[in-house]
Image (spheres, rainbow, N blue to C red):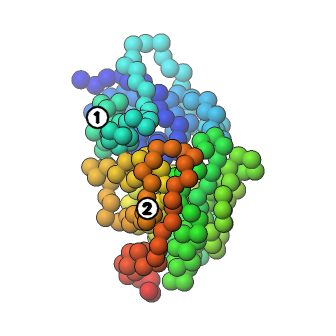
Amino acid sequence: MPERIFFQGMEGIGDNINQRAFIKALAEQGNEIWLRTPLPEIYAGIPNVHFVRANTKLRTQRKNEQRTKIKYEPLPFSTFTRKRIFYGNQHLKNGSVFDAMESQFGIAPAQMDLPSFSLPDIGLPADKPIAVVRPTIERTEWHNASRGPLNIYIDEAARMLAARGYHVVSIADCEPGQEWIPDIEPFAHQKLHNGELTITQMLALVERADIVVTGACVIFHAAMAYGKPMICIQGGNGGNNHHTKITDLRCSDLSRALFVYPDNYCHCQEMLHHCDKRISDLAEKITPFIDRIGISKGVAA
């Protein structure tokens, strides 16, 4: 029997992309869903979902919550089933992000997807394939220095794609003292590193991409949801970020993704651990995938 359910959702952008698969599954059963989120746009197209303001303190999400045109509603004073969505180290010792969410949502995920959003004219060439790259960043509000790959590897992959004719666009939302690129800034023809794109515009750019290069972050989850060819270069913090911890074969297609791991991949669950992120022979590991995607896109090897 359909229920009226209130979810205190998570506030991470990637977490909301993953939550969408569960909200969609519940909506397909006819449930009335009330969701606390700073990112209501991510749930566009799902019927019978009401949004409750999160009043998030997270910088990038706060900008979206303040500018959104989607209506927030006060939670009615009526009988609800109330659930909180969350996961931590213990959940990821025992399973994946999706396992934790399934236990809390009470349903298996539907197929991952995302709405199509409008991308402003940012000067993308019409005659070249697009590669979207995400540099490793660190931020004060969720300081996980362990997770991301060394940017020398993002840089190497970006240059390889540029040499094959891709127009490379790099995206981030840096702000002095709040969010920064910790080592080298990877190569790109266009560097949109200062929040030039809103969250929905960033998602639109990922959907427009012919290939994505990223670590385990929001761009990873967006690329998975849009089914984009993706090279995921891993760093550390593998107890929480190995691809088996952040994907689910029931709702996503991993055949279009290449996962590249450091030679001595660290399976810690520590956010500030000195993980060994060195990767030998990166070019040899990613060239066959780039060539295969290039053939399908008509790009010369």
Residue 107: image tag:
1
Distance of mark 2 from mark 1, alpha carbons? 36 Å
On-image quarter of the N terminus: top left
Residue 130 in sight: no
As drawn, 82 above or below 197: above
Question: Where does residue 272 sit, x and y in percent of width and height?
Answer: 57, 46
- Precedes in sequence: disc 2 or disc 1: 1
Secondary element type, mark 1 = loop
Secondary element type, mark 2 = loop
As drawn, 81 above or below 165: above
- Tell me what residue is drawn at x 35 percent, y 66 percent: 256
Q: Which residue is mark 2?
A: 264
Q: Is residue 10 left or right of residue 109?
A: right
Q: Is residue 250 left or right of residue 187?
A: left
Mark 1 residue crowding within 10 angstroms, few (<14) / some (14–19) / many (20+): some
Name which quarter of the figure residue 298 lies in: bottom left
Whether residues under marks 2 and 1 lie with C-beta atoms below 8 angstroms apart, the answer is no
On-image quarter of the C terminus: bottom left
Question: Where does residue 81 sit, x and y in percent of width and height?
Answer: 37, 19
Question: Where does residue 154 sit, x and y in percent of width and height?
Answer: 55, 68
- Tell me what residue is drawn at x 31 percent, y 23 percent: 3
- Tell me what residue is drawn at x 41 percent, y 40 percent: 19
Name the residue furthest left.
Answer: 1
Mark 2 residue crowding within 10 angstroms, few (<14) / some (14–19) / many (20+): few
Q: Amino acid at mark 2?
A: Asn
As drawn, 179 above or below 126: above
Q: Amino acid at mark 1?
A: Ile
